[in-house]
Image: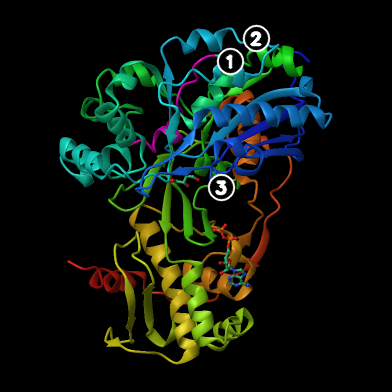
Amino acid sequence: MDETDVSGTYLGFDFSTQQVKILATDHNLQMMKEVSVHFDSELPQYNTKGGAIMQNDRITVTAPTEMWVQALDLALDKMKQSGFDFSTVVAVSGTGQQHGSVYWKNGSHAILRRLDAKMTLHEQVKHCFSIKDSPIWMDSSTYAECRYLEKCVGGAQQLADITGSRAYERFTANQIRKVFCRQREAYEKTERISLVSSFAASMLLGDYAPIDYSDGSGMNLLNLKLKTWDKTCLLSVADNLEEKLGIPVPSSTDLGYISSYFCQRYGFNSNCKVIAFTGDNPASLAGCRLQKGDIVVSLGTSDTLILWLDEPHPSTEGHIFINPIDDDAFMALLCFKNGSLTRERFRDKYAGGSWENFSKALQMTKPTNNGNIGIYFDVQEIIPESVGDHRFDGKDKKVVEFSNDEEIRSLVEGQFMAKRFHAEQLGHKLTPQSRVLATGGASANPEILQVLSDVFQAPVYTLDTSNSACLGCAYRANHGVMGGHKTAFADIFRQPPNYKLAAKPRPADYDIKRYGRLENAIIPL
Ligand code: ADP
Ligand code: XUL
């Protein structure tokens, strides 16, 4: 296979919270093979739960960095044992849980540069970390650091204007500041700080891999307009930080050839390229083959929205990242805590505990629910910060209860109007081409999807996203060798995506502005 041959296979690596996964596609980007290593069950010596270790304070959450290295060894071994021919791989890319950080000790670069193929990665890299346990996205121990950073830049909205998000506990700048303030000696001994994604890429590259724009947007450090580290943020977080972070790069950057370690140990071709790794949510955007105007709605335990944005309007709600497949565009991520569990409460109270009856109630009632609107937060919601049940009749008057069927419709419509309202607040624009791609447990319910379609006035498609981040990285590996951002991402596919049409919008006039007014009215002052 020579350097111009793109007919081989592509690998996506996924360093997620609970496991490391490797997925291979053929040259048509059709999935061929997948292996995974589950941290809790396959590496029990690290005593993780769900891949993480929570301290007694319940707000400090980390993962053993060396566990991720060992999982990579095991995943590659599994792939080899399955008979996979690594010499066919044209390029690899990958993804990691967002926000987590890795602290490489002085001298580690030299170790990465001369890995010995006779030994495992774990044997050689396990002593490379000045902080042994990486802070991860589930950590929420940096409240003070967050307030400090916001104060330094002039406020929460100012920080969002610069970096796409107000300060969040899990965002990397605040985690780095915590290390800088509380473990100064370890910080001083750190020559490089990686995200989980760029850490994984560094091993495959045998060199420090840069942080990509998209995952870098989840740090409260990257200036989204200039695409460079923001000077005020850098100075507010820690000394000498810029040199420890390296220069951020576009997410489709070709970083160079895979380390000779992998050629010798697993039989990779020496021409195999490593394309920059990115965060899991950006990688899912690629895996879902999202396009301008599209929106992914994941209806799981909590509900999540991923949207494509051309013009971002950063706010103190939600997150804006640079788009991983088009540097000139953006994406937004919105998380809503009250999703399926609230739907279950209504199912149990108003539909006798059956999804079938829940669906019937949606069939029996009409779009816009005779003007009745409900906003229901069982637990403190993230967007907006509010809690409790709130019902309004067609004249915006607070009421105590609707009929059983209207209760159910008011819940589902309220949840989807909230999503549309907040997506539009961040700059989302519905176009005639807009599609809603639905995933997660509740996307199995056609009546719920009909309401989603009516509220967004767009067709709803379902897709299997169980592998979307990992698959998205095999796609990105291909995109990277096809010229990266110079080639439209959609042009790399020779086959149409396997979306299934689940609902077409019916004529309905949802007053999203009115919903927004009512939602504002329930936020405690
Ligand atoms: P997670 O966020 O844990 O990955 P899932 O995406 O698997 O969650 O979604 C699980 C949820 O899906 C359950 O809590 C349940 O409420 C919901 N669900 C499953 N089937 C249906 C259905 N037919 N109608 C509505 N909701 C459903
Ligand atoms: C996103 C976030 C999580 C992690 C882990 O902001 O914290 O989705 O990326 O999946």
Magenta region, main secondary structure: loop
Residue 396 position within the rendered picture, expressed as x and y whole percent measured from the top left: 28, 83
What scheme was used to colour the molecule? rainbow
Q: Can residue 36 be seen?
A: yes
Tell me the tag on residue 290.
3
Q: Residue at x 55, y 24 (%)?
A: 201
Badge 3 amino acid: Leu
Image quarter of residue 4: top right
Tag 3 and tag 2, C-beta contact below 8 Å: no
Q: Is mark 2 within 8 Å of ligand 2?
A: no
Residue where numbered disc 2 is placed: 116
Tag 1 and tag 2, C-beta contact below 8 Å: yes
Q: Nearer the viewer, residue 442 or 369?
A: 442
Residue 145 position within the rendered picture, expressed as x and y whole percent measured from the top left: 24, 38
Q: Residue furthest bottom?
A: 403
Q: Which residues are magenta?
A: 207-219
First along the sequence among labels 1 and 2? 2
Residue where numbered disc 1 is placed: 124
Q: Can residue 479 be seen?
A: no
